[in-house]
Amino acid sequence: MLETFTNYVKNYDITDVAIKRKYNHSLRVMKLMEEYATKLNWKNDDILLAKEIGLLHDIGRFEQWKIYHSFDDYKTVDHATYSTHELFNNYVIDTFNINPNHYSVIKFAIDNHNKIKIKNNNEYYIKFAKLIRDCDKIDIIYMIAITKELKFNITQNKISDDIINSIKRYELCDRSKIKNVNDRICSFIAFIFDMNYLCCLEQLNKYMDIILDLYKDIYPLQEVNKIIKKFQKERNL
């Protein structure tokens, strides 16, 4: 599976920093999916399915970057939808030697990994969607806090009302409402409100503390910092 994925990515310019970052992100998320599915005592076939979802969840990102030279979904395409299109409409999934019984869960989980809310009531499908959402967020925050691959030139711009109000409600931010770089970093900080599994929340929280410390002296983010600290205290983090 990994070799097939690597060969797929070779169709793009792997020397491009953005392509290489998405490739490495996919590998790390796959490993996180395996790690946390194991911690959650999932059966072996479900752990394998979790790994497949983790590796393939952003496969549409490569074509998105090639066409638009942007990862901004609101200016280009929804990358989750684009990923399932690449896998199932363009039949890329057939090159991975994956059990066809896994296809519907893979499609559902990838489709829902970037949405504000998961839309379904099938508990089996939802458990995979929840885990890919968690693991994806953990690695994105890891890239901000630890590797510094994602950097932001924070300004003194006011955080937009839509963004700060979402944070006050302990909700994910609607990324279509982002107006400046401060809104953007806040949309990532808000990930802490949408973690589904406690073991995943605890890991993300470790990275979150680094980010909060990094931005603690930036005036527009001080209110956000206080809200997150309040949330952490309420959740005993």
Image: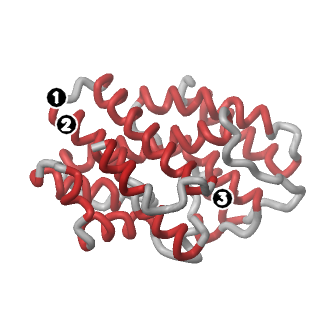
- Return the disc, 3 or 1, that comes first in the chain's sequence: 1
- Tell me whether the residue at label 3 lies in contact with that at label 1, contact meaning CB atoms closer than 8 angstroms: no
Q: Nearer the viewer, residue 171 or 78?
A: 78
The residue that label 3 is drawn on is: 165
Residue indicated by mark 1? 43
**How far, Cα to Cα, is label 2 from label 1?**
5 Å
Q: Are marks 2 and 1 in contact (CB under 8 Å)?
A: yes
Q: Quadrant of residue 32?
A: top left
Residue 29 circle label: none
Q: Quadrant of the N terminus?
A: top left
Name the N-terminal-most of marks 2 and 3.
2
Name the residue type under label 3: Asn
Q: Looking at the image, is 35 positioned above or below residue 117?
A: above
Residue type highlighted by circle 1: Lys
Q: Is residue 48 above or below residue 119?
A: above
Q: Secondary structure at mark 2?
A: helix
Answer with the quarter of the image where residue 82 lies: bottom left
Q: Are marks 2 and 3 in contact (CB under 8 Å)?
A: no
Badge 2 density bin: few <14, some 14–19, many ≥20, Cα 10 Å:
some
Could you tell me which residue is drawn at 18 percent across and 45 percent down? 124
Point 72% across, 65% down: residue: 161
Q: Nearer the viewer, residue 26 or 19?
A: 19
Identify residue for label 2: 46
Please identify the quarter of the rendering in which residue 93 is found.
Answer: bottom left
Q: Amino acid at mark 2?
A: Asp
Going by the image, does 84 lie left or right of 231?
left
Q: Nearer the viewer, mark 3 or mark 1?
A: 1
Label 3: how many Cα within 10 Å (few below 14, some 14–19, many 20+): few
Marker count (numbered): 3
Q: CA distance from mark 2 to mark 3?
A: 37 Å
> CA–CA distance between discs 3 and 1?
40 Å
As displayed, is residue 7 above or below residue 47? below
